Image: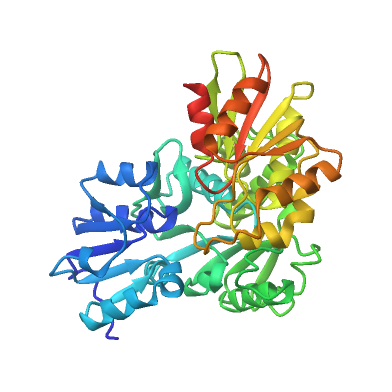
Amino acid sequence: MPQLNLEKIKKVYFIGIGGIGVSAIARMMALSGKEVRGSDMSLSEVTHDLTQLGIRIDHGQSIDLIPKGTELVIYTIAVATFDPKLIEAIDARGIPRKTYPEMLGIISADRFTIAISGTHGKTTTTAMTAKVFLDTGLDPTVIVGSFLKDQKSNFIAGKSKYFIVEACEYRRSFLNLTPTILVITNIDNDHLDYYKDMADIQSAFTELVSKIPPHGAVICDPNDPTVAPVIKNAPCKIIDYTGYLYPNIALKVPGMHNKKNAAAVSAIADLTGISERATKASLETFSGTWRRFEYKGISASGAIVYDDYGHHPTEIQATLAGARELFKKERIIVVFQPHLYSRTKDHRAHFGMSFKDADMVILPPIYPAREVFDPSITSDMVMAEINKNGGKAKAVADFNEALALLKKEAKKGDVIMTMGAGDVYTIGEAFLK
């Protein structure tokens, strides 16, 4: 396929435009004056916000939705796996196409790229980094896997050389990037619908590390046993972010995991010439992002409602530990929607041990996302594991039953936490109404 000249391309179509990453590229192109359209299998808050920019969004997924004259199709990486005939149809029409990760690679190629990778914490760490750079006038371009609260967007168009980007390991997507500075927050077993095992996951991170230039740096915890093999032959310097764990920093976001995220950001700031004083001042006013321990409101019954994107057992455990730091004596009720049949099956024992800081867990059906319905894997499996570990969990048939149970159980002063990568947040919103 010939080299793309993005300057000359005027009409772009996005498939899976509601994805948090894909939507950022759509925003970027719309704001640069291109004619942007797109489609998604489900409409959401993300697609609603895009329509406010004048982007027309079709509900569904078909070659017939792509208008004549389209010069480029950008699509979510899942399309090639789950709808290969659509890719064939695009090729048959002779329309150039790029995946979301490939487009990130094109954006990254000629910039000073700061890539934030890791199984957990990369969204928050990316958002923290963006805030520090914005607060100190460095005017970065930013793509993050959530909405930044101040900008109410997952994309910032900056004019400086800096490109701050969340780097996802799914299907080795982050290998399209060309980072100068790479953060590895941590490495854990995840995306086992694609990776064979931990060694396979580490091989992807090792390949990414090998791309860092000699004048660049990898910021990580080099003593973490899952990270150490990945950086063994790094071609650049290694910076230990644990040396930046300032004991007197007062973060608004709770939990040790967020202190580690802030430490990684402090290391980035130090490398790029931002003073420790300015970095700490910025971090101490960081209040989180959309769907990351996000305060939603207080119900008529006096229960406090939060929402969190956590869907891996390690993330859930860390988030609930942070919640327990804030709410030492209050009752915490979690509405957790498992994400993917494969993840539920692979981690069900770990899920059972991840809710020890919750007093009650309500489990709606699994959010399948990109996976085909599998009746053999259900939320009842997670319920059984939680209860086996001394917790109190109940699986429900649908969102209506979850909401009814929540209304019955929640009392004044209780803390309600909706958790999961699907649409579980709508239960919390309905509860508040």
Q: Quadrant of residue 29?
A: bottom left
- The residue drawn where x is 28% and y is 82% is 3
Q: Quadrant of the N terminus?
A: bottom left
On the question of residue 185 being in view, the answer is no
Q: Quadrant of residue 213?
A: bottom right
Which residue corresponds to the image point at 66% horizontal and 48% vertical from the top-left? 379
The structure residue drawn at horizontal position 24% and vertical position 75%, both measured from the top left corner, is 5
**Which residue is outermost to the left?**
69
Q: Residue at x 67, y 70 (%)?
A: 237
Judge whether 236 appears above or below 27 on screen.
Answer: below
Estimate the x, y position of residue 214 in percent, counting from the top left.
59, 77
Q: Which percent across, then down, holds residue 87? A: 33, 76
Q: How many marks?
A: 0
Q: In this view of the protein, which residue sits in the foreground, 60 or 136? A: 60
Name the colour scheme.
rainbow
State the residue in front, 101 or 214. 101
Left or right? Give the position of 83 relative to 371.
left
Find residue 317 and report its horizontal and vertical position in percent: 74, 44
